[in-house]
Amino acid sequence: MKKWLPLIAVIIFASWFLGGAQAPKPKDGFNLAGFGRLPVLLDGRIQPLDSVARNSLLSISGRSIVRLTNGPPLSALEWLMDTMARPEEANQLKVFRIQHPDLEGLLGTEKSGLEYYSFNDLTNQFDSISAQARKLAKSEENTSDGAKLRTPFQKDLMHLYNSVMLYVRLKSSLEPEGTRDFQRELEVYHDSIGPGRTALEQSQAGKAADQEDLQRIAAFFKRYDTLSEMADPMIIPPLPGQSRQDWRNIGADLKETLRSGQMHPAATNYAAMADAYHNNKPAQFNQAVANYRVWMQENELYPALKKGTQEFFFNQIEPFYKSMIIYVAAMLLGCAFWINLSEPVRRTGFALLVLAFVIHSLGLGFRMYLEGRPPVTNLYSSAIFIGWGACLFGIFLERIFKGGIGLVVAGFIGFATLIIAHHLALSGDTMEMLQAVLDTNLWLATHVVVVTSGYTAMFVAGLLAIVYIVRGFFTRTLTPDVAKTLGRMVYGIVCFATLFSFVGTILGGIWADQSWGRFWGWDPKENGALLIVLWNAVILHARWGGMIRERGLMAMAVVGNIITSFSWFGVNMLGIGLHSYGFMDKAFPWLVGFDISQVLLVALALTPHRFWASFKDSAPPAPPADPSAPARSAIAT
């Protein structure tokens, strides 16, 4: 049984992962998966409606599902479908996250902490919330660092306001809110275009015009003009012969219909979907989805349809979430091995670590394929890549040294970085279009990947040093052999980090010269990268010069965690410089807490040996007392 334990564990977790690849079953007869695969244009890129649903719900509520008081939770896609076609039901769902007690007091409640509210709960006070949010935004227009100066109440207020506005836009993305028979409305609109245009031309020429036709077409135009301003994703694709980027939202397309006189097939199909879903007619809904997919395939839109299908599959299998869970299992097995030294436990943990790495690699590669970019394009993808690199380091370390250290280090960093990535995803789409200065695959594949590999190595070295300090100070498990092994690991990885940080910084300077016309400009991000290179050089020179030994090496490696976290995250929170692409004030307390923890660990590393649990019994015994010593001492005195 012990011999087959690794294989059994891998089969169980692999089956769990592969189970996500199965096609979702229809919900109440509705083929929501087919609807979720349909492509739209949002945030400058083609993406499926499933991604719109997931990113929107994460941004609004911080969760990927909607919990119900009675019944199973709703998926993000079900929530989006209710929002667009059954708003009267969606308005009752508690999806709006509120954390500040003063904001809850504004709503008339006395709760404190994280609470969720429905759109109906906010209706009575939304005018007041909107007025305060607009006043705050206006006061920040002429202040470059206004966002940094927001109080916790103001941050929660702006998040709530932006969430409600996003929700309102989504409600108007498929049809005008409150519509009961959109198909019939479009038929009436289409029939009114001819007489309405004739009446409009007669009126403009000063001739007598049919006022009823004129008023009808004017009412339709006003209705769809408002809809064009509110609708969020562009769900209407270009017709044959138009540019591939000529997507429009439903309101803009219906306004264009007034000029062309032809109703877009996508509009009629989406109207059929909305009516069928609202009236609980799954057969008609599924037929409309199928008809629309056939039309897209026949009209040169297969690439967009394929992109939507592939990204839907990527969302469905959730490779990063599932690899994160497996990382935790591998880390726990590594810790268990330190307790009982059971080789089957270690081998099982190693097998799970390899499985997590394979799933993580598949997710990373799939994401690169969907984006058409190298692995690191923003902070979210950098967290994904650092976790992947740490796992690769851990596999090699565990394969060579077989002491459970690689399991714990790789499992912890893999889990931590994927948690960081999850929280970064709360801000919206993680595959957004790149800024112009970053839009070059050559430098994304060289400078960014190389320098991020340096970050990865620094964090791995720092965590190995933490393992050394914690095991040595609090336990008796840091034997001389283990201490020597950890010292070799940290030294080798610091050498690797020095090389990659230095080369990555040089490549960044070359990129800066091509993009901004200067090799170096003392930008905060550039300074942070230079700090990592200099600190690595200090560590190596101190080691070579004999100024530090094992404990000193560990203390300096932990300080490297502080410097690397500043270069990776801290400079983005400064809000200045060419590399600051978004102020992340929510991460500031976590960064400060992390740095404080590292300072405390350095203090532990510098305490004398006699306070370390692993070294208390290792001091050589005192020589036997010499009876003549006191006399000689007295004479000497």
Image: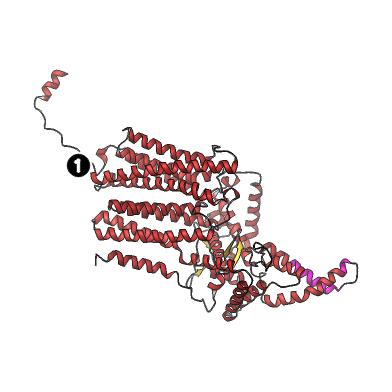
**Residue at the extreme right:** 207
Q: Quadrant of residue 484?
A: top left
Left or right: residue 299 versus residue 223 is left
Assign the magenta stretch its main secondary structure: helix
- In the image, residue 538 sits, relative to residue 367, either above or below, namely above
Left or right: residue 263 versus residue 542 is right
Q: Position of residue 93 (x, y in %)?
A: 55, 68
- In the image, residue 130 sits, relative to residue 303, either above or below, namely above
Q: Name the colour scheme.
A: secondary structure
Q: Amino acid at mark 1?
A: Asp
Write down the residue under mark 1.
617
Instruction: Tell me if residue 362 is in the magenta stretch.
Output: no
Front residue of 158/547: it is 547
Secondary structure at numbered mark 1: loop
The residue stretch that appears in magenta: 202-222
Query: Image point 59% across, 54% down: which residue?
Result: 158
Q: Position of residue 370 (x, y in %)?
A: 52, 61
Q: Position of residue 109 (x, y in %)?
A: 55, 60
